[in-house]
Image: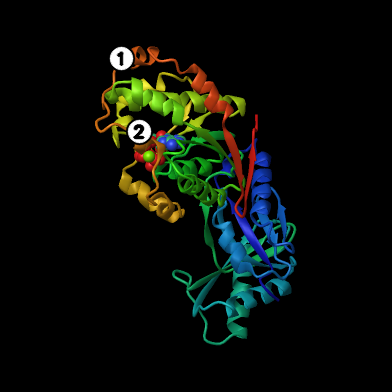
Amino acid sequence: MNYDHILIRYGEMTLKRNNRKIFVNQLHENVRAKLHDFPDIKVKANRDRMYILLNGTDPEPILEKCKDVFGISSFSLAIKADNEVDAIKEAALYALENSNAKTFKVTTKRINKDFPIGSQDLNQILGGHLLTNTEGFTVNVHEPDVEIVVEIRSEATFVTSTRIEGAGGLPVGSSGRTLLLLSGGIDSPVAGYLTMKRGVKLEVIHFHSPPFTNERAKQKVLDLVRRLTEFGHTIQVHMIPFTNLQQKIHRDIPHGYSMTVMRRMMLRISEAVAKKRDILSLTTGESLGQVASQTMESMHAINAVSAYPVLRPLIAMDKLDIIPISKQIGTYDISVLPYEDCCTIFIPNAPKTKPRLEKVEFFENQLELEEDFQEALLQMETIEITPNQVEEFQDLF
Ligand code: ATP
Ligand code: MG
């Protein structure tokens, strides 16, 4: 006898009646990808539950990994038993004896109505069996140290004694893809994480300005992406050289307006990349009023270059709410590393907090930026990041 399974309960996707199969299949694929380093396990999915068959593998590292998979509401170590009273008794006894509890309660869920004994009756039978065959345990139905849950399903009965909270959300890949504008800052990785939580698969775009930004700044971005792959497996990162455009903007646009023009250029390039990659939205880490580029007027002037949907999951969040999430997902320590970002280098001391759209357009029209825009796209370098390795390849299109 042993805890030989992990039982996974689905989250919100149980609401999606018609699309349920798509959600379950996506979650199945994501769990398998997440656990591909464990060759002996098997992952089985059906309409209501997913099961990991451990086949002798230590469950601890697997339980740890399950915590990062979106679409899981909770999961438990489980013992599989035949749908037959003696087998269930034995499993329940094992679960109680291997807990650190003094008090317990048995809860039967008879999903398989063909099972001949009702839930209440089976609770009594199992409770009696446990009391007779152990010493030092008592029943406490209101606040037990451990709840032995017996789920009688058509294929088998699963006995569990712990319940671990899952990450919630929807399985990554079930809500399409977005292109995340990722800086080296605190906010945009959190924005990426929250978007993934709603089932969206990420690609990433990053603007850098060599030689003003160095290799370590680039590595920092890749390290941030590697953290994000923990929640969604492979992520492609598109690196855009931004130096020429930034130098021109810096030289020829009145300083109060250079930040706005630069952001507009970022948005244009991002939209072009998203279109090429068949991606239907962009995502940023913007939060209203946080800095000059994130006032209502700035967002209006910047957003005017694109009709593309821009997801801004942090728009209404305080920095103090964003930081704990970045710590929890492990991006904070990377984000606070001091390497220069392309924006910090070229940003004027006093960017306009209320840029006027007509003025922005007027200044921009004085410049010839089209060639540099195309050049930046051509020079794009794409890097694929997986949780464990970095592969580099260029000229994706
Ligand atoms: P973050 O902490 O994400 O850097 P921030 O508070 O510093 O955000 P800004 O610097 O104004 O705010 O950037 C706003 C958003 O623009 C970022 O959240 C990110 O989505 C995008 N962005 C900024 N710089 C870059 C960059 N170099 N490459 C890609 N996207 C960027
Ligand atoms: Mg920033």
Q: What element carries label 2?
A: helix
Residue ID for mark 1: 359
Residue nearest the viewer, comparing 131 with 393: 393
The image position of residue 145, as x and y in percent, is 48, 73
> Are discs 2 and 1 less than 8 Å apart at CB?
no
The image position of residue 173, as x and y in percent, is 61, 40
The image position of residue 133, as x and y in percent, is 62, 85
Residue ID for mark 2: 346
Question: Can you say whether 203 is above or below 128 in the image?
Answer: above
Q: Residues within 10 Å of mark 1 (few under 14, many from 20)?
A: few
Report the side of 58 relative to 294 (left or right): right
Residue nearest the viewer, comparing 394 with 33: 394
| Amino acid beneath label 2 | Phe
The quadrant in which the C terminus is found is: top right
| Amino acid beneath label 1 | Lys
Q: Which-is-in-front pick, marks 2 and 1?
A: 2
Report the side of 239 relative to 393 (left or right): left
Residue nearest the viewer, comparing 238 with 214: 214
Is residue 286 something that shows in the picture? Answer: no
Residue nearest the viewer, comparing 234 with 21: 234
The quadrant in which the N terminus is found is: bottom right
Question: Can you say whether 253 is above or below 218 in the image?
Answer: above
Question: Can you say whether 358 is above or below 10 in the image?
Answer: above
The image position of residue 334, as x and y in percent, is 43, 52
Query: In percent of the image, x 53 and y 61: which residue is there?
Result: 164
Colouring chosen for the image of the structure: rainbow
Q: Residues within 10 Å of mark 2 (few under 14, many from 20)?
A: some
